[in-house]
Image (spheres, rainbow, N blue to C red):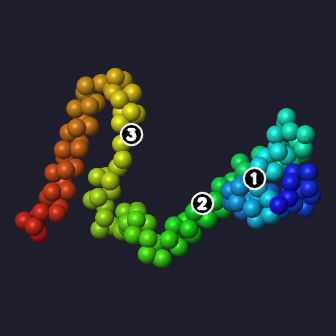
Amino acid sequence: MKYAWELTADDKASFLELIYEGMDPARAARELDTTGTQFRRLRNPISEHYDKDFETAFRAAVTSEQHEQRRLERIRELVWERAERGDARMIEKLALIYDPDWQTLRHANLNVNVQMVARMLPHISTAELERALAEIDQEKHDIIQITSPQAA
C-alpha cells in the first residue's frame, strides 16, 4: 500500500482520471494500490500532506458532468450484469421500469417515508388532502377495471 507521502504526480493524475471515469474515490484508490484515506490526506487542509492543487483538481473532477455521466453508465452496467446473472430483485426493478405490462404496479410500489409525511401533514390543506385521496381512489378503481376478468 502506498501512503500519502509516497503518492507521485502520476498517481494523482491516474486517480483523477479514474474519478472522471465515474469511479468512486475509494475504489479509484484501491485500483492504485492504496486507500481512500491516503488521497483524503492530500485534500485535507489540516493534513501535513495537503496538496491544494490536487484538492482543486479533485473538486473539478468529482463535480464534472463527465464524472456524473460515466458514473451513471457504470451503475447501469452493474444493474444489467446483476439482472443477467439472475438477481430476481434486479429483474423485478427493471421490469417495473421498462415493461409496459408492469405499469399498473408502478404507482402501487412506492415506499413512503412516514416521518416525512408526518412533518408535511400540517402544511397541507384539507382540500389538497381530499383531492389526493380522490385521485388514489380513482387509480385503484382504474386498476381494478383493467385487471378485472369482466373488463376483457
Mark 1 or 3, which is nearer the eye? Answer: 1
One can see residue 52 in this view: no
Q: Which residue lies furthest to the front in this view?
A: 1
Q: What residue type is labelled 1?
A: Gly
135 left or right of 71?
left
Residue drawn 24% across and 35% down? 131
SS at mark 3 in the image: loop
Name the residue carrying label 1. 36
* Lower position in the chain sequence, tag 2 or tag 3: 2
Q: Where is residue 96 in the image (x, y as percent from the top left)?
A: 37, 63
Q: What residue type is labelled 3?
A: Asn
Q: Which amino acid does label 2 sit on?
A: Leu
| Relative depth, front residue between 99 and 90 | 90
Q: Which residue lies furthest to the left in this view?
A: 150
How far apart marks 2 and 3 lie (CA) works out to 25 Å
Name the residue carrying label 2. 72
114 left or right of 129?
right
77 left or right of 9?
left
Q: Position of residue 71 (x, y in %)?
A: 64, 59
In the picture shown, does residue 32 fall above or below 53? Answer: below
* Lower position in the chain sequence, tag 2 or tag 1: 1
Mark 2 or 1, which is nearer the eye? Answer: 1
How far apart marks 2 and 1 lie (CA) works out to 21 Å
Name the residue carrying label 3. 113
SS at mark 2 in the image: helix
